[in-house]
Amino acid sequence: MREVIGRRVARLPEETRALLEAAAVLGREVSLDALEAACGVGADEVMLRLEPAVATGLLVEAPGFDYRFSHALVRDALYAGLGRVRAARLHLRTGEALETLAGVEASVLAHHFVAAARAGGAAKAVEYAVLAARQAAAGCAYDEAVEWWGRALAALGPADPARRSALLVRRGEALRAVGDVAGARSALEEAIGLAAAIGERVTLIEAVTVFGGMSVWNWRHYGVVDDESVALLEGLLKEPLGDAERATLLGTLGLELYYSPRRAEGERLAADGVRLARRTGDPRLLARSLNNYVMAAWVSEREDERRRAVEEMLALPLDPTAEAVARVFRMAHLLRAGEFAEWDRDLARCARLADEIKRPEMTGMARIAEAAGRTMRGDWAEAERLAEEFTALISGFSMWGLDYPGLVTLYTCRRGQGRVDEIADRLVSRAHDADMVPLRAVAALAALDVGDAALARRLAERWSGEIRDDWTAELLVVVWGHVAARLGVPDPAALYRRLAPYTERLVVSGMGGAGWGSTHLVLAELADATGERGLALRHARRAHETHLRLGLDHWAGESTRLLAELEG
């Protein structure tokens, strides 16, 4: 086909062929104004010279005196015939010509100068690719922003390490926005190395704190501590800093320490960052610092402090992303408190924000938050639909355990319907994987649900030795509690003591995904397992009262069943 097109083009006048080559550089859609500017020929002359191409069917006249290649293959064949050097020179000439026209988009100019980067267009390639990246991000086209930052870096090359490190930070931010954690870390590690080598402290701070930006989750793999990042942050904090820089570093360090034995120290550092952010009077910085604190302080006993921080965030003038983050956090707090009317309002607001932001991270997390409410209300079909949707939304992320929230939702639904046998083997198998530590309690209880007490005991004895005090504990201590009440492993009395301070909460899996009724329910089972039948009855009655008052029909059925067993 290319040869056929080439023969047709070869029969055209030379001046027509020259214009067709310039048109091929513009793309399949050819603007007369752009072609006139690129070739330095008047519009009437351009139209006259293109008549043979129109007559032979290579070009089609479009409305407004513009043109279109009759088929993409025609344009592709012409472009392929240019050769690398001629194509680059034509792109440079075209880019320079288009700069003189009003209303040409930065992405169009960037395209031409990037293609001409090795033919004298490198500086403008960087300039327009940066502008195109920023415009794409502003328009929520985050994948496009990633591409343009990459093209800017390719055009820049290694010659300017200061600018390269700054561009790498921007690319890292864009990659984080689309959930490419591995790609973001790679870009940021290069930025950190370059900035440290040349003493660019501002860029170094920006690079090392990207993952401390507004987010609904800790981007580190579960249980992982990056000692190098911790050391770098601590080293920077020893230097003279302004309040804003110090607040940003403190909040990020608080997140980095979350899975370490120094978690409590990280919480205090994040709180210090909040105090400094308040002093600056910068609402964006304060929102970020509060977000850092909410995640650094994510342990069961900090429920009230974390909710106050979220409410403080929502009192600030927030951009849509920051508001969505705050509301998703607030939804989990509202659900634990049984404030369903307010939860419904936040759900509706989150849905509108997610549509506006167009980030899979935020849409996925809003669906995860919604699934918790649906399972709390026993709406199994809708919860399973949400699980399928949010799993698909976040499946492209390079993070640990992307199927974890969906599996927790699915198990909760199937357990509520008496259908755990359909997924028990899958849960047990997945729980053996190194990245799925939080699923292990669920797997053990699933084994009990299907009547395999021997397997459940083996799993409990192997996996229940250390129940971490982190964001997973809100559900997993409860799940292990149901296991312990039946098997005596782990220690029912220890789990009772751990849950006793939180009797009036509803059980929610972290930010969402599943809701398991009143904490009184599992406390009743644990109390009975330790021989405290009277205490067990009191808990069961309180659970039942809570479920009836809140209209949680499924969980009211569960507490009715338990009361019957305890009173029998």
Image (tube, rainbow, N blue to C red):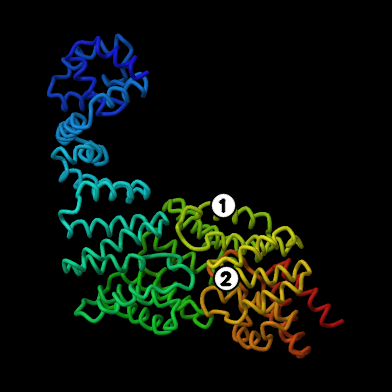
| Image spot of residue 283 (x, y percent) | 31, 69
Question: Residue at the right extreme?
Answer: 568
Q: Is residue 113 visible?
A: yes
Dot 1: few (<14), some (14–19), or many (≥20) neighbours within 10 Å?
A: some
| Image spot of residue 329 (x, y percent) | 49, 68
Quadrant containing the C terminus is: bottom right
Q: Quadrant of residue 5?
A: top left
- Of callouts 2 and 1, the N-terminal one: 1
Q: Is residue 277 visible?
A: no
Name the residue type under label 2.
Pro
| Image spot of residue 97 (x, y percent) | 15, 32
**Left or right of 5: which side holds 45?**
left
> Which label is found at residue 197?
none
Name above or below for residue 529 compared with residue 546.
below
| Image spot of residue 225 (x, y percent) | 41, 74
For the residue pair 565 and 64, the one nearer the viewer reads as 565
**Left or right of 120: which side holds 276?**
right
Mark 2 lies on residue? 438
Name above or below for residue 293 compared with residue 66.
below
Quadrant containing the N terminus is: top left
Q: Nearer the viewer, mark 2 or mark 1?
A: 2
**Left or right of 311: which side holds 13?**
left
Name the residue type under label 1.
Glu
Which residue occupies 70% across, 81% down? 484
Which residue occupies 72% across, 72% down? 455
**Left or right of 67: which side holds 198?**
left
**What is the distance, in whole Å, between disc 2 and disc 1 at their CAs?**
21 Å
Q: Secondary structure at mark 2?
A: helix
Dot 2: few (<14), some (14–19), or many (≥20) neighbours within 10 Å?
A: many
Mark 1 lies on residue? 389
Q: Secondary structure at mark 1?
A: helix
For the residue pair 495 and 294, the one nearer the viewer reads as 495
